[in-house]
Structure formats: C-alpha cells, structure tokens
Amino acid sequence: MSPFQQHRSLSLLPEGAVFLTETATLIVADIHLGKSAAFRAKGLPIPEGDSARDLSRLLALANKSHAAELVIAGDLFHAPTGVTPELEAALALFMTRLGMPLTLVVGNHDVKIPRFPAGLRSVPHLDLEERIRIVHDPAHASGDRLHIAGHWHPVVKIPDGKRTSLRLPCFLFRKNTLVVPAFGSFTGGSILDAKADDRVFVALREQVVELPAALLS
Amino acid sequence: MHVSALQPFFDQKGWQPFDFQKQTWDAYLAGKSGLLHAPTGLGKTLAVYLGPLVESNGSACQVLWLTPLRALAADTLRALREPLAEIAPHLEAEARTGDTPAALRARLRKKLPHTLVTTPESLSLMLTHADFAEKLSGLRCVIVDEWHELLGTKRGVQTELCLARLRAWFPGLRIWGLSATLGNLTEARQALLGSAFAGSVEVTADLNKSIVIETLIPKEMERFPWSGHIGTRLARQVADEIEKANVTLLFTNTRSQTEIWFQELLALRPRWKDKLAMHHGSLDRAERDHAENGLRDGSLKCVVATSSLDLGVDFSPVDQVIQVGSPKGIARLLQRAGRSGHQPGSVSRIVGVPTHALELVEFAAARDAALARNVESRTPLKRPLDLLVQHLVTCAIGTPFEAEAMRREIQSCHAFVELTDAEWQWALGFISNGGGALAAYPRYHKARIEQGCYTVDDKQLIARHRLGIGTISSDPAVSVKFANGHTLGTVEESFISRIKPGAAFVFGGRQLALVRFRDRTATVKPAGRVLKGQVAIWGGSKFPLSTELSHAVARRLQGHGTPSLEMEAVAPILVIQKKWSRLPDDESLLVEHARSREGEHLFFYPFAGRLVHEGLAALVAFRISRESGESIHTTQNDYGFSLTGKRGLVLDEDTLRLHLAGENLLDDLVACMNTAELARRQFREIARVSGLILQTMPGKKDLSQRELQSSAALIYEVLDRYDPGNLLLVQSRREIMEKQLELTRLSAVIRRLESAPMHLVETEHLTPMAFPLWADRLSATLPAADAATRLETMLRTLNQAAGQP
C-alpha cells in the first residue's frame, strides 16, 4: 500500500527500496560498489566483502519483488580505484543473473568512472509512469511532479529520553521529493535535520512505518 | 666542564644545591639513567638539566626535553634558558611542538639546537624524517617531564616507543624522567626505561614539602547528604576565603562546574569583574592565556579552573588553592595543592569545599592518606596494538627497518615485552598486505618489503600518516564565535543542538545568545541582561573515587584517625546512619533493604568507586531480572549502588552472594552492558590511531580525501563482518571494559566480596547513605535491547500517551 495519496502504485520496501507496481520497477540508490577497494588502494586496510554482499542482496530483492526493471538512482560505484577486475566480473555475473533491464541514473560518484560495463544503460535522469522522475541529487528536483532521489543517505536520529538515541536509515519525503536510504552496506549516513512537513519512514521488522512527528523533534 | 663549574651559578643566585640535585648530577655523569621524584618547583629542572649542560661539547643537539603538554613548552623553555645563559651562553634551546611557527620549524629542520623541547607527538613526527638520526648524532640525554601524566596513557606508550627508537640508534643514551609522587614509582621507572632499567637509579627529593589540607565547614549542616549537586551553597564562605588571600586558584571537577562557580562568584562580588578569570580545556587559547598570564603576574584575584591547570606551569603569586567537590584521588589533591607555595621550602595549602555532607569525610580521609603519602598508582598500558601499527609506519617512513631487529626494539619497551608472535605477525600484516586475513584485503598495501626491509615511500601516504600521528582523539567539537570572527572556544554538538536560535546559554564566563548554528560553528552574540541561560555541559566520564581514597574514607567512617573538624561536623549524620543501619566499611559488605511507594530497594556499599558500582549494579540487576523477569532500575555513586524494582528484591544472603559471584563474570557483563555498542564507540580512537580513518586538516575541507571518509562505527561493522579476528576489535572490547567499568578493579572487588562478611539490614527509612542513591534517578546504563525493540517501545509509549489502544 502506498503512503502517498497521489501515487498509489508506489510502495516502500523495508530493504530500503521503492517499488512501482504499475510498471514493476524496483528503485534503489547509493550502493557505492568497490568502496573498500578504493580505501585499500590508498593504503587503508578495510576488508573486502560488502560489494559482493550488496549485489547478492540486490539480486534477492529483485527476485522477491518480481520486478521487471531495476533502476539505480545514482552512485552505483564509489570511485575509479574501486572498479577492479574482480568487481567488473562480479557485476557482469550479477547482470546476467538479474535478467532484467538495469538503468543507472548517473550520480556524482559515477561521473568519475571512465567506462560503464556493457549492458548498463546510463541516463542523467529517468522519467517513469506519469509524473514521476528519478534523479540522483534531490537538488535537481524541479516542478511539481514526484521525484525519487538518493545522494543524501538519510538517517534519522530519535532520542529515547535516556541520553541515548537510535540512528536508523530512513526514507525522507520532503516537498515533492522522496529520498531513499543508501542501499550499500559500507555507506555512512547523514542525520537529517527534520523540517516541518517532512515525512519520515523507517523499516521496522518486515514493514515500513511512518514516524510520528513527535519522534522527529 | 666539571660539576664545580656550576658553583658560580648557584653563588650568583644565592642558592645552595640540594642533595637530590647533586645526587642526580653524579648519577647522570656516571652514565646512569633514572627517575627523579620530587615535588613541583625549580629544583627538579636544574637537577636533571645541569648534568647534561656540564658535559656539553659542541653545539649539536645533545638534549631532548619531552613535555606532555605543548602549552608547557614555552614555560619550560624559559626555565631552561636561564641556566643556559649563565653556564653556556653560546648554546641554544628551542621548542618544537604543534604550535611552533612555520619559519622556526623550517629552521629546525635544517639544524637542531643544543636543547630541543618537544612533545611525544612532535618527536614521533620527527622520526618520519630520514635524516633525523643523523641530526641527532650528538644526542646524549632525553628528559621526560611530568612522566606521571603520561604513564598509563597511550601517549605514555608512544613515548616508550620513541625512546626505544632513540635507544636503538644511540646505545649509550641516558634517559631521565621527572615524576610527582606515585604509588608505583619502580614500575613507573620500568615503563620509562624499558630494557635500560637495569642499573638505573631512583632519586627522591625529600624536601619535606609541607602540605596543609583544610576544609570549609558549612555553617549550617543539612540533615541529609545529597550527591550530584553543584553545591554552590558555600559560595559566600568561598568568596570570603578568596578575599583573604592574594591570588586564589579555584579548582572544580568539571567544565560546567567551572562555568557555574565563575557566575556565582561574579554575582557575589561584581567588583571582581576584571579580576576573575576562568580556565578550562574547551576555552579558546587566547582566553586561557589571559588566565595564565594573570596568575603569573598576580594581576588576577582568582582563576576558576579544571584539571587543565593541574600541570606544570609555575604560578608563583598563587597563595591559595581551593578544591570544590570531591578530590577523587590523593595524588590529584596533592598535585593541586602544589600549585600554591611553588617555591622550595614554602607551604602548599589547599582548602576543600564539600558539595555534600559525605565529602567532608572525603577531605578528612584525603588528608590522612596525603600525610601518610599513601598515593595512587598509575598502571602502565600493555600492548596497545593501534599505537604499535602507527609507530611501525612512522618508523618505516623514516628509515626502512628489518622485521626481527624492529621486533627486538619494540619488545625493549615495557608496554610490549609480552608481545606475542601472533600479535607481531598481525601488526606486520596490517601495515603491509592485510596479514592473516590476506584474502580479505586484495590489492592492499601500505609498507613494501624492499631488500628485506619494510619501507613506505608513497608520498600521499606519508603526508596522510604525518597528519594522523598522535593519539589524542578529539571528538568533533563545535566552535563558538562572535559574528566578527572572535573565537571563544568549543562546545559539544549534543549541547548546542538543543539550544534554539535566540535562546541564551552560559559559556566561557559569558551570557551568550545563539544567533545560528551551521557547519560546526555556533555564531553567538552577548545576551541581554534579562536572559538567563543554561550552562554549557560537556560529556566525558567522571573520575571515580580512587581505591586508596575509598579505603581512607571507609576507615574514617569506622572512627579511625585523629579528631577533625570535618568529622565533628558530619557526626550527627553518621549517628543516624549507625542508629538506623550501620556504618559501612570496605572489609565487609553492608546491604540495606527498604520499601517505598515505588516498590523495593536494595542498597549495596562496596566502596569501590562509581565505575565499578555501575558495573556491579548492572550485573546484579541483570542476574536478578534473568530469573524473575522483573525490570530493575539502578543508580550508583562512589560509595555504593542501588536496585529498585516493583517486587522480588529480597534480603537473603545466599541469594545475594549468588548474584555477586565471580562465576561467568565476563559473559554476564558483556550481556548486560551492551558492550557491542560501547566497543563501537571506543573504536573511534583506535581507528584513528591505527590509521583506519583519516585525519583531516583542521579547518580545511580536502575534497580529494572525501572519497576516503568513513565513520569509525561503519569500519567497526565491516571489520566485524569480514575480518572478525582483527586484533583491533579485540583491543577495542578490552579497552572499553577497562575504561567503562574498570574491569581489573571490578574483578578484584568481586573477589574481595566473595569472602567478605555480609551485613544485611532491613531499614524503615532511607538511611543517610541510601538517600543520595535513591535521589539520583538518572541512570547512565545503556539500553541493552536491539534497535527494533527500542523503536517499538517508543512508538507504544507515544500511543499510550495519546490515549490510543
């Protein structure tokens, strides 16, 4: 069920993805493949593992949701130094197994990648259904249609009144833009500075729930 | 030159060398290393410095002087240049610290002076320069000032590692440490000297430093003691004491307390407006300089300070020191007392100001222990691997090293004597190719092995490593500025984010109104008179009462010691405690049981300090609720802890002993303290020291580094998932247990309690000892539940509040 009156075909998945039922489109953002490799290339000993993990999570999600098409709302890659032959091979295997069109809305990190793998369609932005546009940076939203974006890696911080707080990745709906959480495991988050009229959704067990405004202040 | 060459210097000053000074010169000139333990004062500096001066030849660098605080470097330099000018006017002394201007730094890169004053971090940094060994080729002596401050810290271990490097370069090197009184001076000397310990000496300056510890007795003793209060009730009496003295240094235990006392004194004596200053670690350097200079030239009446003024600097005009609140430890009280009567032979006097009644006992007890010189020990750290890997990279940048020789060098340090094969191999792997978990680190390299030697030659890597040298982790702070750019200092984000624009707060002794908070800067303006703001608060752990002082307090409560004003004042309260229950001590365990509207309470008094009590409270609560399912609320202070539950807290010796047993201690603590979350926090420092997160240039945003930014929490998770055997994770868990719970002390207390007699008392009222525990409802215990459960609880609470089902 969609939390948005005007867009009944849109649903939020607890894995941190958006699903459009009408076109069976699965949308995720900010995977940052090859991030640990980019760190290692600069002499920082961060172990490998997350890129493979994220690709297999994504594959499982695509199958489970019966998607017909997968869209990455930017930052599939992290940095050119992270695009190793191993990663290229893993990505090729992923795309074969995926068996559906894969579109990348090019993000600020992707821009630096010299060559995208064959079979990956890349676009600056993507218009879907009626009045839905996918961009990477929420700042590129304009007009009154619904935008789905990434880039911010939104995280909500909820104080529990006992000097501690919860930090949870979240969906943020602000004005006409839905910002999705970062899908990648080795991606930080930035704590959102909640504004009036923001709507914030988090995964709670197997569902996505909207946070009451009282928890946001 | 000969020792006799020093005589004219002393004659001219009209001084007589002290015995300890002569002993130190003789030992030094006989080629020995050692530790000099003496009260603060000029005498120490001359004792360790004149030996090396006497035997100087040529102007090459012969003496390295390490100081723990760069703020002390300028004062140290002044103190060294004085005898230098008299005895060897052709020789130079300079300081090289993080504060040194670029021009002087460049000059020092070319040629080092005869005496170089520096910090452990700057010394480490200099080790990364290939020609450093050559420049130091005339080095004869390293002097480590205030060694007791470094001991027991990672900076102390960094010092040990640097000294090992220097010892390996110059086998005849003499190393001298200066230390205040410690309970473990021999161990302190072992840690300082490592493999050079054999044949070294300990020199004690027995100057019979007179110390007077007095206490302000409240004119009206309240009936019950309270804890956790700021205790400005005695402010009027304190102001009177300040009035009587020339220059007063008033110490508090926290930065917030400093702010509060400053406001309070100003309100009581508005005419002191320009004669009153404050000093704490979050104030801007200029503000602190103002306070320090005022103390030095005696132009201020009083400075309100935290431990930021505990160290070194000679403030001769100070003739009175006041300690507000618990002294927490004997060494600390002695150190603070020593800030007055700085000259050899004069009396150091400190006035204690209790903030609640039981602190009267603490001051009496501290005096007992101080007079008996029963001072705390500082336990040196063992095998901090984050520092080891940092140091190995530092060395590899400077001069390529061969693994076996380096291992011998590292193990010549006290901290790494017990370094295992596994740890050493892991460390080498960490800095080169990923080591044991090689498969998890494809394409990683930092140090390369060239002709059997580890070396680092990537320029970018070297630059980044230099930036990251050092161990003090500074949590990101928010700077407080006026719109014109004048900086006042820093506050924590958690504090400032709660202040709304336009609202007032107190910081740096000023009433400020927040204009805006953006990009780690809080822009402020002076608040109008009407606005009364919140005082800035900082996190950070509170010191627990030391074992030595706890013991002295317990003895006082049992009636030991000479009659004193403090005990006389607190007597009526102790009489009530004795009548309703009994007086606790640290040889048996008193447990009280009481009922109130909230349910049942158990109060335990192990006398082991706040941190240990926090761990014990969580442990016992966890074990009880595991059986009964009841939720239990805990509180703790320095004397004991309390449990509160709706029902089921029984006063039964067998049951209590079971819950306090040492069996499964570690597992139960891990289960009840949310150690995973705590370890993740502790990991920030380890990640920084070991080079897993990059240090950014202060104030600079380096865009090319952005792709390499990550939070320590995230790296902790990645390591935990893909390289769970990483020894830095193990270190993080170990450090947090020690830091958060004083695990070593907690284990010792558990052992003591297992065989100690137990006194169980059913009380009708809350006793004077129980009352502060009951009153302190703020529990610092972290919630142990997972995120989903916590969120569900919050949502449920919210729904209930809104009257929904």
Image: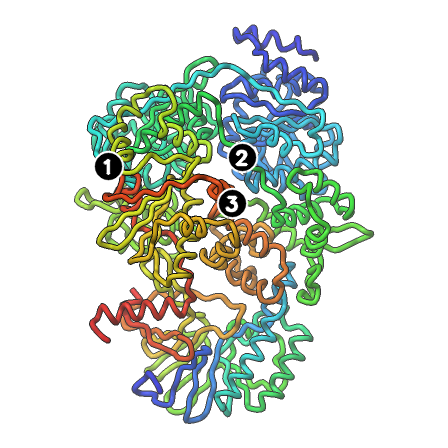
Separation (CA) of disc 1 from disc 3: 32 Å
Marks 3 and 2 close (CB-CB < 8 Å): no
Can you say whether B200 is above or below A55 in the image? Answer: above
Where residue B584 appears, as percent x and y from the top left, is 36, 36
Identity of the residue drawn at 38% across and 43% down: B489
The type of residue carrying mark 1 is Phe
Residue B622, by quadrant, is bottom left
Q: Which sits in the foreground, A132 or B305? A: B305
Which chain does the numbered disc 1 sit on?
Answer: B
Give the side of residue A28 with respect to residue B692, left or right.
left
Where residue B250 appears, as percent x and y from the top left, is 34, 29
The residue wearing badge 2 is B378
Q: Report helix, strand or loop for mark 3.
A: helix
For the N terminus of chain B, the image quarter is top right
For the C terminus of chain B, the image quarter is bottom left
Which chain does the numbered disc 2 sit on?
Answer: B
Q: Name the disc covering residue B747, or none.
A: 3
Give the side of residue A192 with respect to residue B111, left or right.
left
